[in-house]
Image (cartoon, grey):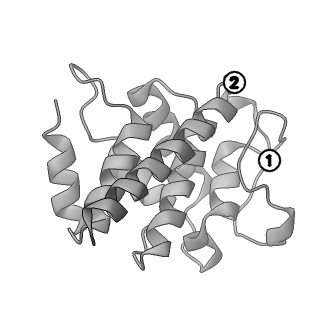
Amino acid sequence: MSAGIRLLSSVLVAVGLLLLAIACNDEYDLSSSDTSVNAPNQNKDQVPQWLESHHEISAADWLIIRSPAALKGDVTDKQHRVAILQDASEHFRENPRMIANRATQLEDMLLEIDIEESAVSLIDQFTHLPTRGTPHNFSAYCQYYFNLRAQGYDEHYALAELSKLK
């Protein structure tokens, strides 16, 4: 892949993540949702592309019905999704809706380059990355991770490199 294409790809990722950040600045309380989704059984046309503050579905439920991996049967239970989103929200000091949107966007982008990783798995893995003493947030880690994976590095190498960022 040429440097120009990589730069363009990075710019497009940054713009997309910026747009998501603008759309996701509202606070959300995970405990306030009583929506329950055990499997992705909704019509894909009824599922919003991005989760916004006016949607009545919880971030944990939306994550599982919006995620391409979930649509293929990679389903985690609701308690697990809520716990992962809560951990990520506390770790990155961002609301769960924003994290769910970014992780699903990253999952989509990885699928475009034939890499299958679920949004739930990505959130779980990123929660182990450093945030203290570093300016990096969940959005930045998504961009860096995509760039490394697009360059052909495997997930273990990409995560190891991200854990070294200062």
Residue 107 horizontal side relative to residue 1, left or right:
right
The percent coordinates of residue 110 (x first, y second) are: 44, 67
Disc 2 marks a residue whose amino acid type is Asp
Q: Which amino acid does the dot numbered 1 rest on?
A: Thr
Placement of 26 over or under 76, stated as above or below: above
Residue drawn at 84 percent across, 72 percent down = 43
User: Looking at the picture, how far across and down is residue 27, in whole percent?
Assistant: 67, 22
Q: Is residue 118 visible?
A: no
Labelled disc at residue 35:
1
Residue 157 is left or right of residue 48, and the answer is left
Circle on res. 26: 2
Dividing the picture into quadrants, the one containing residue 63 is bottom right
Secondary structure, mark 2, is: loop
Quadrant of the image containing the C terminus? top left
Q: Residue at x 33, y 51 (%)?
A: 125
Contact flag, marks 2 and 1 (Cβ < 8 Å): no
Query: Label 1: few (<14), some or many (≥20) within 10 Å?
Result: few
Asked whether the viewer can see residue 58, the reply is yes
Q: Quadrant of residue 121?
A: bottom left
Q: Position of residue 109 (x, y in %)?
A: 49, 64
What residue is rendered at 55% in x and 50% in y? 81
Distance from disc 2 to disc 1, alpha carbons, whole Å, reads: 19 Å
Which callout, 2 or 1, points at the residue further toward the start of the chain?
2
Q: Nearer the viewer, residue 142 or 2?
A: 2
Left or right: 81 as drawn, with respect to 35: left
Percent of width and height locating residue 160: 15, 52
Q: Which quadrant of the figure contains the N terminus?
A: bottom left
- Relative depth, front residue between 108 and 28: 108
